[in-house]
Image (tube, helix red, strand yellow):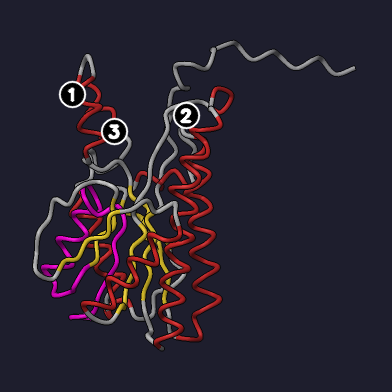
């Protein structure tokens, strides 16, 4: 797929920017999609500024790809996370997370498939999930729900379009050193302790780095993964392989559980 075009959503920073950089270095042409101003500049990189929650944004990305080459890959990376327990989650917050994470991924996958079917390209799609898809974290109910749904969508598309040679996979990162975590560390009363807590989620004992996720995405897009489809590749330092304690969200009251009534 070298010299082919890959669309990457959420491309202006964090994991998305790392994926763009990795793909450019490997020889791909890239269309970056983001609501933020462009930060990366390269002659093989085109930008679409837009909201992934709007289907028109994905159509623009397909058109931008056609202007610079043949669309052969798509990475649905854009996402947002809330920090509110379910009983206090507002309609707006829930809708924003569902629209960006789930609908954005569904619309991107659909746009990629429409292009692949029309052109006969045996393309590859990579959806960015999370360890939240299979392990619950306090305070992120809508995020957790969207990531679980993204993995179901990945399997569905892999099965539905596999006979056309189209591959669809997902990546499930752990805690990655992106702007969100960096900002949280800066705002923390004890940043060293908070980073230690983040690191402790992973048996490898550290945060992941964006380029580590980017390399996994590049692998799944490439011919090296030619018989890999419908898979979820964990890039989480073994976090998903363990069971570990995690405190409830600060806004959830802590009460002792009532003892069961004695049997008659």
Closer to the camera in the image, 34 or 201: 34
On the picture, is 252 further left or further right than 212?
right
Q: Residue at x 29, y 48 (%)?
A: 35
Q: Is residue 175 above or below residue 182?
A: below
From the viewer's perspective, is the residue at label 3 or at label 1 nearer?
1
Q: Residue at x 44, y 66 (%)?
A: 109
Q: Position of residue 36 (x, y in %)?
A: 24, 46
User: Where is mark 2, residue-wise?
Assistant: 138
Quadrant assignment for the N terminus: bottom left
User: Where is mark 1, residue-wise?
Assistant: 186
- The CA distance from mark 1 to mark 2 is 21 Å
Quadrant assignment for the C terminus: top right
Identity of the residue furthest to the bottom in this view: 120
Q: Is residue 194 above or below residue 93?
A: above
Closer to the camera in the image, 1 or 71: 71
Closer to the camera in the image, 118 or 226: 118
Q: Is residue 169 above or below residue 69?
A: above
Tell me where the magenta segment starts and ends, as one range.
Answer: 1-30
From the viewer's perspective, is the residue at label 1 or at label 2 nearer?
1
Within 10 Å of disc 2 (Cα), the crowding (few <14, some 14-19, many 20+) is some
From the viewer's perspective, is the residue at label 3 or at label 2 nearer?
2
- Contact flag, marks 1 and 2 (Cβ < 8 Å): no
- The CA distance from mark 3 to mark 1 is 18 Å
Within 10 Å of disc 1 (Cα), the crowding (few <14, some 14-19, many 20+) is few
Q: Is residue 253 magenta?
A: no
The mark nearer the N terminus, 1 or 2, is 2
Closer to the camera in the image, 161 or 67: 67
- Disc 2 is placed on an element classified as loop
Q: Position of residue 48 (x, y in %)?
A: 27, 60
User: Where is mark 3, residue-wise?
Assistant: 200
């Amino acid at each position: 797929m070298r010299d082919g075009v890959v669309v990457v959503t959420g491309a202006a920073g964090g994991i998305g920017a790392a994926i763009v950089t990795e793909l450019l270095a490997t020889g791909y042409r890239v269309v970056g999609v983001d609501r933020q101003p462009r930060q990366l500049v390269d002659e093989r990189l085109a930008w679409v500024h837009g909201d992934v929650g709007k289907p028109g944004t994905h159509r623009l990305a397909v058109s931008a790809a056609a202007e610079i080459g043949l669309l052969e890959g798509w990475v649905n990376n854009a996402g947002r996370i809330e920090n509110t327990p379910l009983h206090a989650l507002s309609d707006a917050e829930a809708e924003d997370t569902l629209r960006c994470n789930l609908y954005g991924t569904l619309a991107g996958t659909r746009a990629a498939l429409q292009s692949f079917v029309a052109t006969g390209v045996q393309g590859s799609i990579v959806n960015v999930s999370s360890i939240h898809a299979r392990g619950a974290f306090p305070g992120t109910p809508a995020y957790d729900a969207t990531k679980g749904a993204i993995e179901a969508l990945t399997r569905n598309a892999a099965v539905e379009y596999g006979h056309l040679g189209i591959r669809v996979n997902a990546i499930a990162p752990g805690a990655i050193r992106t702007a969100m975590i960096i900002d949280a560390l800066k705002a923390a009363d004890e940043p060293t302790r908070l980073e230690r807590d983040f690191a402790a989620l992973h048996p490898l004992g550290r945060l992941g780095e964006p380029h580590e996720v980017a390399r996994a995405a590049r692998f799944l897009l490439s011919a090296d993964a030619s018989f890999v489809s419908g898979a979820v590749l964990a890039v989480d330092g073994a976090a998903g392989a363990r069971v570990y304690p995690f405190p409830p969200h600060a806004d959830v009251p802590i009460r002792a559980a009532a003892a069961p009534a004695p049997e008659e």
